[in-house]
Amino acid sequence: METTQRNRLSEDERVRLQQRLHTLWSDMYVLTKPEEVIPYECDGLAAYREVPLAVVLPETEAQVQQVLKTCQQLNLPVVPRGAGTGLAGSAMPIPDGVVLSMAKFNRILDVDLQSRTATVQPGVRNLAISEAAAPYQLYYAPDPSSQIACTIGGNVAENSGGVHCLKYGLTVNNVLQVRAVTIDGDIIEFGSRAPDSPGLDLLGVLIGSEGMFCVTTEVVVKLVPKPQLAQVIMASFDDMGKAGDAVAAVIAAGIIPAGLEMMDGPATQAVEDFLHAGYDTNAKAILLCESDGTPEEVAEEIAHMEEVLNGCGATRIQVSRNEIERLVFWSGRKNAFPAAGRLSPDYYCMDGTIPRRSIGNLLRSIEEMEQKYQLRCINVFHAGDGNMHPLVLFNGQDHEEWLRAEAFGADILEECVRLGGTVTGEHGVGIEKINSMCVQYTEQERDAFWSVKYAFDPTGLLNFDKAIPTKNRCAEYGKLVVRRGETLPHSELSRF
């Protein structure tokens, strides 16, 4: 299945359609005035913007069904939206389309202590789940840096991770069941509260589908017991290569830390200036390695990790002495993005994933790209699973500089693919990485993606032209971009 470009509506057509939507959805909040819809023109990737035709905020599952049925009847594209904290443009509106905001679905429906689960609506904030479970000494493990604001529905759409995903897994590893509405208005339940469910396992297909298949209305998540103790090591290195080798050495030693994060020197300095968390500003790189469990388990694992890190050339090792200090150490990593905002008017956060053994190679390539594009880049990443988050610094008021930043980002993603990795780890593809999908996947593989999309959404109205590139798009990208002297796949196809 290939979607086609849509003709833009005239202003008169837009006004008539907006009036009709107000009538059809009179029992819902419908926003159509410019000052009402402009706040929805982008998600966390503010470089890409589109003003929607309308924004609708249903409050019940029946209203979600009504919205989707109406959009199907009127052939209106729909973009489901959570908190808008995504960084790939997945929630960017579609021209002359509707944004379906799930902000009013914000209730925690049940916390089941016996099964250690929570049933929540998609508009519930990630952190709110752990707050609700805290009195029972339970919590929800995936913890994206935006967990104070991001919603569980958005986490399901993007398969979000966080600093503790190495040991506890991504969203897909912590969700048991999802209830959702299709573009036809049908209700489907994916997964099960039980250890297994009958039929095909489609839960893993839905999680990470970026709102292209259906609209989530309810989620059952796993809760895990709070560990008795957690401690974190902050290790300094005088060389990025040594730090990268230390990551591989920790895993090779049979240790699976609760968190294993890495920051380069410029990122460390930016964070320390921002938070004063006690980071070593002379280090070329720092690692944060956390252990959790019983006091005996933590003591043994911390000692083992110290031995490995010292053997890899660590120049300084600090172990958190109490819970407050542990949280301070982590606060620096979780605030790396806002700290970067003090260095430059804008930054472009990438999300490639590579094999751990290739961390040093990618960082060396990024240094060369800094010279090529004449832009700075600082690096923070989930080192344990090779999920890299280079931050390209630029001035968004300078259009030519933004174009260089965009090309820099694409180059990083394609280098990740060359090193045996992928173009995304947890942020999703959205509109940001859709061209890079032409590099990673063959035409046959992309056709398979379209087949799955078609099975859920035959009309192609849900999140149109996101995540899966068309052949035409790949042909256009292949003609425009040359990497290492070769054009990209499908340059022989006609352009738009």
Image (cartoon, rainbow, N blue to C red):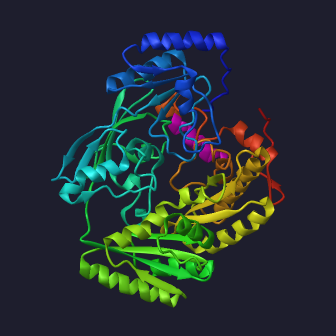
Q: Position of residue 78 (x, y in %)?
A: 51, 27
Residue 222 visible? no
Residue 449 magenta-drawn?
Answer: yes
Q: Nearer the viewer, residue 323 or 460?
A: 323
Question: Mainly helix, strand or loop, the magenta region?
Answer: helix
Residue 307 vs residue 133: left or right? Answer: right
Q: Position of residue 39 (x, y in %)?
A: 54, 32
Residue 346 vs residue 382: left or right? Answer: right
Query: Measured along the vertical axis of the image, is residue 318 above or below residue 391?
Result: below
Q: Which residues are magenta?
A: 443-453
Q: Position of residue 162 (x, y in %)?
A: 44, 59
For image coordinates 64% across by 48% down, the residue present is: 437
Residue 176 vs residue 387: left or right? Answer: left
Residue 197 vs residue 404: left or right? Answer: left
The quarter of the rendered structure image containing the C terminus is top right
Residue 260 visible? yes
Q: Position of residue 43 (x, y in %)?
A: 54, 40
The quarter of the rendered structure image containing the N terminus is top right
For image coordinates 44% across by 56% down, the residue present is: 161
For image coordinates 48% across by 66% down, the residue present is: 332
